[in-house]
Image (cartoon, rainbow, N blue to C red):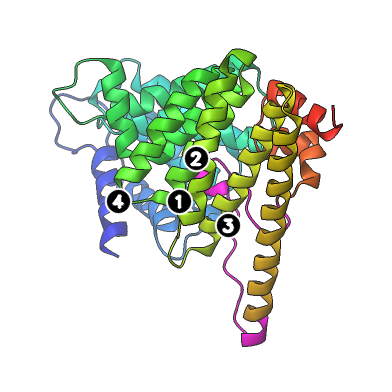
Amino acid sequence: SHLTTGIQTYVLDALVPPAYAADTVVKPPTNEEVTLLRDALASFYGQPRDSPRALELLNQAVDAWQRQAPDERAALYRVRGDVYLDLKQPLDAVRDFTTTIGLLEGPGGDKADESELPAARLGRARAMRGAFLSGGKTFTKDEWADVAKDYQVALRLSSRDDYLETDSEKEADGAQRNPYAAWEWAQALRGAGQYETASETHTLAAFSFKDIGDPARSSVAELDAGIDLAAAGDGNYKDAKEILEKAIPKTTGITSGTDVELLQRVIAKEGEARIALASILWNAGDKAGAEKQLGEACVRFDQLEADNADREAARMKKGLLPPPKYNKVMFSIDDIAGAGGKVSCARFKNDEFLTRTLEWPESLRGKVQKLNKLG
């Protein structure tokens, strides 16, 4: 395709220096090495994608490119990091993205295209989130703060408005350009225990999704902003309650066109938000309010599963194939729990579900445990 050809041409232009360059004593890549790289990129960016073959070829290309300039090697490691992510090997991806960042921030790295460093920072952050969500790694708050820093720097460097002066303005501009990354940044901030900042960042993501005409994901981010404050101390109770009580009713008016799974994720997030609200109401002594929110959450989860079962029965009756399932590292707002037995009231009694799937910190898990025990 034109897109695939364009990507390959761009990467090759960045990685293959002209043989006639007068200011270098480095031997340029041979024709065989250029062909090797071209085949590797075609395996990954072409259709159908063949990531195992791309990895095999990129391993050879990385070795062949060791005599080249730092900016050129950095681009190769960054591409291989993307391949590792596609292969669900997040820790290997972290290693390659870290190598990329080291090369770009070291001598000669400033010659790289300006998009390389934010792409590597974003890639590393996503790989770290993927390692956690897959159960392969557990992070301390300080480690989550490092992940959040990668997102923050990536969004700051992604800003393209030359008139912005402060880092916060540039980060907001980057978030508007990539609300998906902004939502992920907020999740990392939650993991770091920075609940108020996480709430502000989720709110920024919500506005950014709304600006691009995406009310469904905007609703998810707004609900998460309330969940952040529910995880904070009792001093944030009033604000958390206000945000959640305002955001929850909005989900009933959301449609997602033909994207049924997106709408299912919105409903699941609504149920999650109701249980978070019930938890803080119970903790504050409002037993009746807590029981009402818990009951409504369970009803919504039951409705979600019943609707999903009806859709599945109708699909099978028509003899249609099921929607494709993608085997990838989870890190995105589109990877949150939806229908199909992924979320229910009963699962909120499972600490692993609360920790890995919902990314609830210990403070909020403790509140829901009290709710589950009815006091």
Q: Position of residue 86 (x, y in %)?
A: 53, 48
Label number found at residue 264: 3
Left or right, 332 with respect to 180, comes to: right
Mark 2, residue position:
247
Nearer to us in this view, 112 or 203: 203
Q: Is residue 89 left or right of residue 135?
A: left
Mark nearer the N terminus (3 vs 1)? 1
Q: Cα distance, mark 4 to mark 2?
A: 40 Å
Q: Nearer the viewer, mark 1 or mark 4?
A: 1
| Disc 2/disc 1 C-alpha distance (Å) | 12 Å
Q: Do labels 1 and 4 touch, CB within 8 Å?
A: no
Tag 1 or tag 2, which sits nearer the N-term?
Answer: 1
The amino acid marked with disc number 4 is Ile
Helix, strand or loop at mark 1: helix
Question: Can residue 64 be seen at all in this image of the molecule?
Answer: no
Quadrant for the C terminus, please.
Answer: top right
Q: Are marks 4 and 2 in contact (CB under 8 Å)?
A: no
Q: Nearer the viewer, residue 89 or 158?
A: 158
Write the start and end of the magenta stretch as one range. Answer: 316-342
Pointer 1 residue? 216
Marked residue nearer the N-terminal end (4 or 2): 4
Can you give x and y, in whole percent of width and height, for residue 61 in the image?
43, 42
Residue shown at 62% from the left, 53% from the top: 338
Q: Nearer the viewer, mark 4 or mark 2?
A: 2
x and y, in percent, of residue 55 in the image: 52, 47
Mark 1 surroundings within 10 Å by alpha-carbon count, few (fewer than 14), some (14 through 19), many (20 or more): many
Query: Which amino acid is tagged 1?
Result: Ala
The residue closer to the viewer here, 287 or 191, is 287
Q: CA distance from mark 3 to mark 1?
A: 10 Å
The mark lying in front, picked from 4 and 3, is 3
User: Reading the chain from its start, which is encountered first: label 4 or label 3?
Assistant: 4
Mark 4: which secondary structure?
helix
